[in-house]
Image (spheres, rainbow, N blue to C red):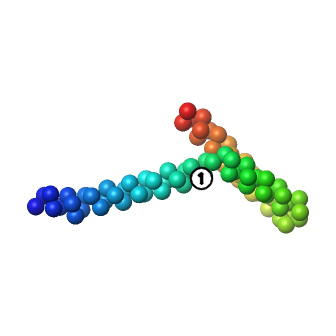
Amino acid sequence: MFILDDLLIKLPAKGLIGIFKKIHEMAEAELYDEARIKEELLRLQTLYEIDQIAEEEFQKKEAELLERLTEAREAHSGAV
């Protein structure tokens, strides 16, 4: 009976936990990807230069991206 309980309850739960851990790892990798953040900064700069976004919006988004870049660098230096 206990083996059946393990198969029906514990194994699917362990599988879901593994999936959620992988999703978390992938989300963190994307969030802290310095190259991606730099690309977003460049894209933002381009949009500002061709007058697609206002200066206020540009400054707000630039500050957010620079903060993310700082956090990414801290995360990488802490992991090494």
Report the residue marked by disc 1: 30
Q: Residues within 10 Å of mark 1 (few under 14, many from 20)?
A: some
Q: Pick the quarter of the image with the N terminus.
A: bottom left
Residue 72 position, x and y percent, is: 63, 44
Residue 20 position, x and y percent, is: 42, 57
Residue at (79, 53) in percent of width and height:
42
Horizontal side of residue 18 vs 43, given as left or right: left
Q: Residue furthest top?
A: 80
Q: Residue furthest right?
A: 50
Q: Residue furthest bottom?
A: 52
Asked if residue 21 can be seen in this view, the reply is yes
Horizontal side of residue 8 vs 14, given as left or right: left
Asked if residue 59 can be seen in this view, the reply is no
Residue 79: image quadrant is top right
Horizontal side of residue 12 vs 6, given as left or right: right
Residue 50 position, x and y percent, is: 89, 63
Q: Pick the quarter of the image with the C terminus.
A: top right
Dot 1: element:
helix
Residue 7: image quadrant is bottom left
Residue 37 position, x and y percent, is: 69, 51
Horizontal side of residue 72 vs 66, given as left or right: left
User: Is residue 8 shown above or below 33?
Assistant: below
The kind of residue on which mark 1 rests is Glu
Residue at (89, 59) in percent of width and height:
49
Residue at (63, 48) in percent of width and height:
33
